[in-house]
Amino acid sequence: MDAQNRKFAIRPRRGSPAPPDDPAVLAITELIQAESARADLEEPELVTSIDPGRVWLLWFAIGATEAVCRIVEREADAERNRVFRHVVDAVFGSGRVRSTVDPVHADRSLIEIFESAGSEAVQACMRGDKRLGYYIGALRVASARDN
C-alpha cells in the first residue's frame, strides 16, 4: 500500500488510553493543541466558519503525524496507527465529529494545504522555531478560496 492510501487505512480505536510517555505522541499532541488554541484565541470566527467540526485540524494533524513518524522512523503501520490514535484524541477528545466537510468529497488541494501546514509545523519545531500559526495560516488560505 502506498503512503497516500495508507493514511486512509488508519482507523482510530474507540476509548484509546491516555497518551503514554512516548515523546513522539507527547510532542505531536502538544503541537496540535497549541496550534488549535492559537487559532481559537486569535480568530475564533475563522475557526467557526471554516472548521467547525475540526476536520481540517485533523488533516493538519495527519500531516504533522506523517512528519513526526518519518523523523522518529516509525514506518510500520502498527506504530503509526498507535501515534495516530492519540492524535485523533487530541483533535476530537471524546466528542463526536460534526462537520460540513466531507473528507471523501473534500477538495484535494485543500487537504494538501492542511497536511503540508502540519508537516511544516513539525519541521519548524525541529529547527527550534517556537512560532506557531501554521494551522491558522491554512485556515486563512481556505477562507480566501471560499470568497
Image (cartoon, helix red, strand yellow):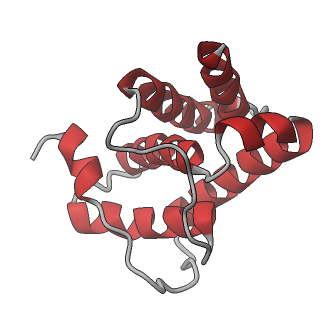
Residue 86, percent from left and from top? 51, 69
Position of residue 53 relative to residue 101, above or below, is: below
Residue nearest the viewer, comparing 57 with 101: 101
Residue 8, percent from left and from top? 27, 51
The answer to which image quadrant residue 109 occupies is top left
Residue nearest the viewer, comparing 115 with 26: 115
Residue 21, percent from left and from top? 57, 77
Could you tell whether 1 is left or right of 134 in the image?
A: left
Q: Residue at x 51, y 64 (%)?
A: 88
Residue nearest the viewer, comparing 47 with 137: 47
* Observer able to see residue 103: yes
Q: Residue at x 54, y 79 (%)?
A: 20
Residue nearest the viewer, comparing 115 with 104: 104
Q: Residue at x 75, y 40 (%)?
A: 47
Could you tell whether 118 is left or right of 125 in the image?
A: left
Residue 124, percent from left and from top? 63, 30
Could you tell whether 79 is left or right of 50 in the image?
A: left
Which residue extends farthest right? 41
* Observer able to see residue 128: no
Position of residue 89 relative to residue 107, above or below, is: below
